[in-house]
Image (cartoon, rainbow, N blue to C red):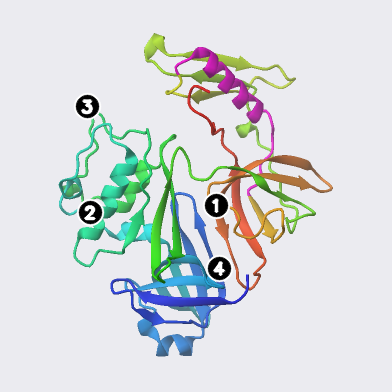
Amino acid sequence: MGRWRYFTQDALTGEVLHPALPLSDVEFGNELNGPGSFSATLVPRWAAANASVLQPAKALIYAEADGYLRWGGLIWSCEPEDGEFRLEAAGWSSYLTKRHDTHGELGGRGPYVFQDPCVIIRAIWAYAQEQPDGDLDVVVDATTSSAKAGTPAEPWHSYWYETPVLGELMDDLVSEDGAPQYTNLSSFQANGSILRRLALGYPRLGTRRTDISFSTGVNIVEAPAVTYSGDDFANTVIGTGSGEGTATRYAVDPHRDGRLRMETVLALPDVNGTDVLGRRATAERRRLQVLGDVQSITIRDHPNAPISSWQIGDDVRVTVNNQWVSWSGWSRITADSYRPEHPDQAVLTLRRADSFHYGSPED
């Protein structure tokens, strides 16, 4: 990345409050199912003289590099810290942590029975942004899902007298296995305006990437620690599919490998065929028999994976070789972090790639 610019904007009017803030110690990034964060410092004297362009609950802040908008969000705090003026911000979804359903059922949109959580998430944002001075102009993706929220016995409700926090309602909808996932994004549009976006993904956000990879000695700056944990290991997978009670589809895939028998359950309620369930259980067992997990890596810009060539949620092949271990596996990017003082590097937070199936339920 080349030249960086940080600017603020009025949250309601869109007016640019300051076109180029003199920030230092900048660090920012996005995350899976969360708002992401932004932090920086200012010279206290400058901050005191320009307090109006940094007001929490009023100012939005953006990070731009060479005409490409890398991050955007709301300023939440500005305060002196150890002789510096510290600024903290968070992405668009953080706004919902300060909003409540004051009318009930999202202004009459609910309750919901067997409803797509994506529909409810859009309803939450629509309700929040239709209130006076509540329009942050966030656009929610039109993604749909086969997940369901609410049943005839227990409909999805939002009662005004419980003063529900809209952010908690949204996060509850994405917390279950098989639920949609989100992240926050910002970008310039063709007319120069800024798109503030909640990106929704289903059946997951991101995809398995075979066009990029991370390896020590190539684009990983320092060999990271590889954690080996028995909690993540299994050599027997118990698969359950569609149906209820004794009619539940069921398959067990054990493998004797010289270790203690360690079992885990793979619940696939959309799978109707026992043969398909068996194949999925076998694939999961093979995955879980591979020990090792890398939780964070620092990578440099490289043709194998140019900076920002990934998206939050992507699975990428990670290879670590050092004097202690030789490990390779799929890891999912759950957050990224950038420090413009190191423009050709990024820190990625990873977790062991889940057993996400990239086909239809019956594959």
- Residue 234 at x, y percent in the picture: 63, 26
- Kindly identify which residue carries mark 1: 311
Three-letter amino acid code of the residue under disc 3:
Ala
C-alpha distance separating marks 3 and 2: 25 Å
Residue 169 visible within the image: no
* Disc 2 to disc 4: CB gap under 8 Å: no
Q: Residue furthest top?
A: 246
Disc ID at residue 127: 2
User: Residue at (30%, 49%) from the top-left corner?
Assistant: 122
Q: Which residue is mark 4?
A: 27
Q: Is residue 289 visible?
A: yes
Residue 52 at x, y percent in the picture:
35, 83
Q: Which mark is residue 153?
A: 3
Front in this rendered view, residue 123 or 228: 123
Q: Mark 1 or 2 closer to N-term?
A: 2
Does the magenta stretch mainly form a helix, a strand or a loop? helix
Examine the structure image and report whether residue 290 is included in the region drawn in magenta. Answer: yes
Residue appearing at x 38%, y 44% in the figure: 143
Label 3 vs 2, first from the N-terminus: 2
In this picture, residue 110 sits left or right of residue 264: left
Please identify, in this view, whether the residue under mark 1 or under mark 2 is nearer the observer: 1
Describe the element under mark 1 as helix, strand or loop: loop
Q: Which residues are magenta?
A: 272-295
Circle 2: element type: helix
Q: Is residue 59 left or right of 279 when viewed as pictured?
A: left
Q: Secondary structure at mark 3?
A: loop
**260 vs 36, nearest the viewer:** 36
| Percent position of residue 190, x then y | 43, 67
Up-down relation of residue 252 to residue 316 (above or below): above
Q: Quadrant location of residue 110? A: top left
Mark 4 belongs to which amino acid?
Glu
Secondary structure at numbered mark 4 = strand
